[in-house]
Image: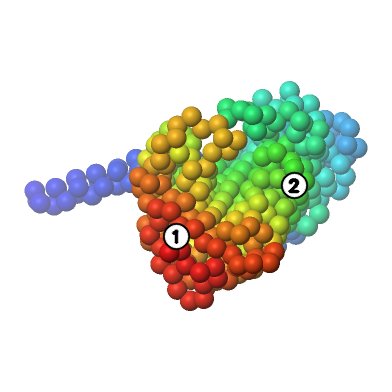
């Protein structure tokens, strides 16, 4: 009996430990290990209401599609009704132009999941920057089960060209970011699909504190000189998949920073922009590690970088590992393959000591195309923590101009294989 009692006590302790770990993860906004409810499903099916689904049309709540009236309160009322409905429900934004200031679509929601938001019209962000006390325009947060679909028609127009002149990040490292078009915060099992994002004031799509997010068939557009308009920015999130999207912007097409794990990018076209980046890393205190990044079947056209890993000098210790860049086409790209552990935008870094971000298990496989810079491969790693287990296999990067391309490797342990153009670092 004593043995049985001890076994029972141990089992209870184990259960409590798991429960506490779950609660802690939920408090941080990321719940690990939850089932993927969209696995193997046809995401396009959410474009058509199902029998018995309740549709909440924003027009029924006072919204006016004239592009002039502020519809924020009408949208919030319609969302609250859809979110709280106990059965299947859909928030419908029909064709037309709807002006909005900052809006939060918050959970938790009741009833059947996922909750569906269908955008068939154009949402226009207010140009009055004082109406954005935080750095987002539209945010969905604290929701389990969410589908936002544009059905190939819906557009988020941030009207960023009216406020980009206020961006001072090129002069100050402590600048205040301008609002992102769309933010997901503490969303689990979410889908963003078939949506257009135009001229965001800041980042177009910001995914943070999320678990199991699918971003597909997105069209993101901003001018090449628009400041800090990253296409998709991912932090503190697990299991994010970005696929079949085109991104034209003034900063990174995709940027992956601290706390991002198991991120997959597939069939993305990027350019203009600054490429697909892991980083910047090492900017903040107590950064969470980055692990499990896969970038495959992507095309970069005329970008300032190709696939890039970047970290600040003088950083606190953290790590980024298990990264795969495979089957990528570069077309007239500067710095097609680059690791920069001395990243210092605008030369305003006060700490010049080596980066303490440990980089390891990085694989570049089947990358081909043209480079607009002589150095097609630039691996500049930390002198304190050299890059470990870097592999380049079947690299064929020709010069866009006449002449050969070159590779440079500093503080990096690199293995080469297959066809190598440029030739391996000596």
Outermost residue, front direction? 403
Query: Can the viewer see residue 319 in this picture?
Result: no
Outermost residue, left direction? 2
Total number of numbered discs in the rendering: 2
Label pair 1/2, CB-CB below 8 angstroms = no
Residue at x-position 70% and y-position 64%: 401
Indicate which disc, 1 or 2, sits on the residue closer to the N terminus: 2
Residue at x-position 80% and y-position 30%: 127
Q: Secondary structure at mark 1?
A: strand
Foreground: 76 or 169?
A: 169
- Horizontal arrangement in the rendering, residue 97 relative to residue 1 (left or right): right
**Image location (x, y in percent) of residue 97:** 86, 41
Q: Which residue does the numbered mark 1 point to in the structure image?
A: 362
- Horizontal arrangement in the rendering, residue 416 relative to residue 404 (left or right): left
**Image location (x, y in percent) of residue 46:** 70, 58
Indicate which disc residue 108 carries: none
- Horizontal arrangement in the rendering, residue 323 relative to residue 220 (left or right): left
Foreground: 4 or 57?
A: 57
Residue at x-position 64% and y-position 32%: 169
- Horizontal arrangement in the rendering, residue 93 relative to residue 363 (left or right): right
Q: Quadrant of residue 193?
A: bottom right
**Image location (x, y in percent) of residue 352:** 44, 35
Q: Which residue does the numbered mark 2 point to in the structure image?
A: 224
Query: Can the viewer see residue 11 in this picture?
Result: yes
- The crowding category of the residue bearing disc 2, from other C-alpha atoms within 10 Å (few below 14, some 14 to 19, many at least 20), is some
**Image location (x, y in percent) of residue 72:** 77, 32
414 above or below 110? Answer: below
């Amino acid at each position: 009996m004593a043995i049985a009692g001890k076994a029972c006590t141990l089992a209870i302790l184990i259960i409590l430990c798991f429960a506490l770990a779950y609660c802690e993860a939920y408090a941080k906004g990321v719940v690990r290990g939850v089932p993927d409810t969209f696995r193997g499903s046809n995401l396009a099916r959410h474009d058509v209401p199902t029998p018995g689904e309740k549709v909440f049309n924003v027009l029924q709540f006072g919204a006016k599609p004239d592009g002039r009236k502020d519809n924020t309160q009408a949208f919030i009322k319609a969302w609250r009704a859809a979110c709280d409905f106990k059965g299947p429900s859909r928030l419908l934004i029909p064709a037309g132009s709807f002006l909005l200031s900052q809006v939060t679509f918050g959970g938790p929601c009741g009833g059947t999941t996922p909750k569906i938001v269908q955008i068939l019209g154009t949402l226009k962000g207010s140009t009055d920057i004082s109406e954005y006390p935080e750095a987002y325009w539209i945010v969905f947060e604290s929701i389990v089960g969410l589908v936002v679909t544009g059905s190939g028609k819906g557009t988020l127009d941030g009207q960023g060209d009216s406020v980009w002149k206020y961006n001072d990040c090129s002069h100050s490292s402590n600048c205040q970011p301008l609002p992102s078009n769309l933010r997901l915060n503490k969303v689990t099992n979410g889908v963003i699909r078939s949506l257009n994002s135009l001229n965001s004031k800041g980042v177009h799509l910001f995914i943070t504190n999320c678990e199991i997010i699918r971003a597909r068939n997105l069209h993101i557009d901003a001018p090449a000189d628009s400041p800090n308009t990253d296409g998709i920015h991912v932090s503190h999130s697990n299991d994010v998949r970005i696929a079949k999207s085109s991104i034209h912007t003034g900063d990174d097409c995709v940027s992956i920073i601290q706390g991002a794990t198991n991120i997959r990018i597939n069939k993305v076209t990027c350019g203009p922009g600054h490429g697909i980046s892991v980083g910047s890393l090492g900017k903040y205190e107590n950064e969470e590690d980055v692990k499990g990044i896969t970038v495959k079947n992507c095309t970069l056209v005329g970008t300032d970088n190709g696939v890039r890993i970047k970290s600040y000098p003088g950083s606190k210790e953290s790590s980024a590992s298990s990264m795969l860049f495979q089957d990528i086409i570069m077309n007239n790209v500067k710095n097609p393959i680059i690791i920069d552990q001395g990243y210092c935008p605008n030369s305003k870094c006060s700490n010049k000591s080596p980066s303490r971000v440990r980089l390891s298990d990085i694989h570049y496989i089947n990358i081909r195309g043209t480079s607009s810079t002589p150095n097609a491969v630039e691996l500049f790693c930390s002198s304190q923590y050299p890059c470990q287990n870097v592999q380049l296999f079947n690299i064929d990067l020709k010069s866009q101009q006449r002449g050969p391309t070159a590779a440079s490797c500093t503080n990096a342990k690199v293995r080469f294989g297959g066809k190598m153009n440029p030739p391996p670092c000596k």
